[in-house]
Amino acid sequence: MKPVRVGICGLGTVGGGTFNVLTRNADDIARRAGRPIVIEQVAHRSIHPDCDITGIKATSDVFEVATNPDVDVVVELIGGYDIARELVLTAIANGKHVVTANKALIAVHGNEIFKAAHEKGVIVAFEAAVAGGIPVIKSLREGLGANRIEWVAGIINGTGNYILTHMRDEGRTFEDVLTEAQALGYAEADPTFDVEGIDAAHKLTILASIAYGVPLQFDKAFTEGISRITAEDIQQADNLGYVIKHLGISKRTDHGLELRVHPTLIPKERLLANVHGVKNAIAIMGDAVGPTLYYGAGAGAEPTASAVVADLLDVARDITTDHHYRVPYLAFSGIGEDVGSLPIMPMEDIITAYYLRLLAVDRPGVLARVATILSEQGISIEALIQKEATEGELVPIILLTHRTKEKQMNEAIRQIEAMADIAGSVMRIRVESLDEQE
């Protein structure tokens, strides 16, 4: 069979890894695909030092690749929103199939891209957009196709997990570990996307769409970062039998879908609690299969390239199949038709348990007033730790509550922070058990 000809746009970390995997494993890839997959052209501003592009047609203009009649598949690895969107839509308009690792592009512009691709009859594949080399999209879209998905919860940003792991293991501050992560290349100079949950929300948006058959709705995802987490919070969580992880969580409920990213206390015995460093892991609950876990490298040159090349294999196999018979981009045919029955819930309607940390003046009646405020909002206390007074006679108080609605907790925190005997703001971290009953 004639080769599938690939144009790679971007030869940075992932692009370089993809180039090298395709060339190094060309024979095995051809045997799996049933035809050779060859690199026809590359577009780059700079070349990854490990790449030898001798004999490969090269350009600095990515749109030259998108319009090249000799290219069958455009691999978009330039990142970002605007130029990447234009590149992908240009490639589709020219009848090219597309493979991308760009989670931001898919989460924000995916609905538009998939519509254009469907009308043109081309494939858009994006396994590498979520969790690097872990084949979670294929597993969720195809392997778990028999299941009604109940919830998805994952550590889907390695930077945040690296920071929380080292804060717990070494008792260090957020700022200290972040600086180390930046020096090691695990965190960007501007780490906002990672530590504030935006990157994870992009990925969770994609997973939720595939899990429940709804359009991509990144603008409705709730995000909260980890920059306020202290060594004290991590120690107290440990004392209570929990580990703090920065999770992306999506659940199907009677009132709609939850879509949220935030620091979370999870029990120590859960598998997700034992995922360390820069590794990613996603737990998925299906009604037939039960809980499953997908673990591995969530980033890096060749782990991500592994997913990119796997998508190229799928394209090579399906390239001659009528597009009506291919696996739908987001798993479900007729996507969006039932969106009214599965709305994304506002955060204030979410029900979960809570960890609270506050500093109170050491005088009689303060804790009783805090307990009264919680009780008036229908919030029950499960556990309480009151430490000895610190300098200035402020007493750290740690509370663990039973499950309650976020709206009630917001009001309780507002009233507690208004008390004259409470110093500063209340630290709130949500608690999830992530078991079959959740």
Image (tube, rainbow, N blue to C red):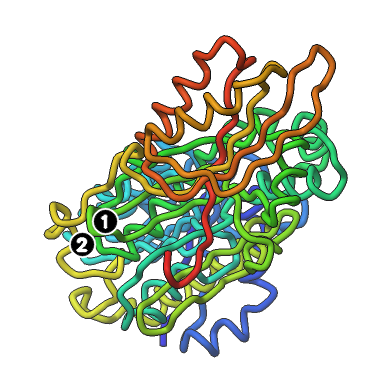
Q: Residue at x 67, y 22 (%)?
A: 359
**Residue beneath the point at 55% across and 54% down:** 42
Residue at point 56% right, 73% down? Answer: 293
At mark 2, the secondary structure is helix
In this rendering, does residue 116 appear at all? no
Closest to the observer, 18 or 128: 128
Residue 86 horizontal side relative to residue 267, left or right: left
Badge number at residue 114:
1
Q: Residues within 10 Å of mark 1 (few under 14, many from 20)?
A: many
In this figure, which residue is indicated by the disc labeled 2? 118
Could you give the CA–CA distance between mark 1 and mark 2, rounded to whole angstroms? 6 Å
Q: Amino acid at mark 2?
A: His
Q: Nearer the viewer, residue 130 or 357?
A: 357
Q: Is residue 363 above or below residue 97?
A: above
SS label for mark 1: helix
Task: Say which residue appears at 67% left-offset and 63% top-offset.
Answer: 297
Q: In the rendered view, does 226 fall on the left or right side of 173?
A: left
Q: Can residue 134 be seen from the camera position used here? A: yes
Q: Position of residue 152 (x, y in %)?
A: 44, 62
Disc 1 + disc 2, Cβ < 8 Å = yes
Q: Position of residue 84 (x, y in %)?
A: 42, 42
Residue 116 % position (x, y): 22, 53
Which amino acid type is shown beneath numbered disc 1?
Answer: Phe
Residue 354: where, in percent of width, then height?
52, 43
Q: Which mark is residue 180?
A: none
Q: Residues within 10 Å of mark 2 (few under 14, many from 20)?
A: some
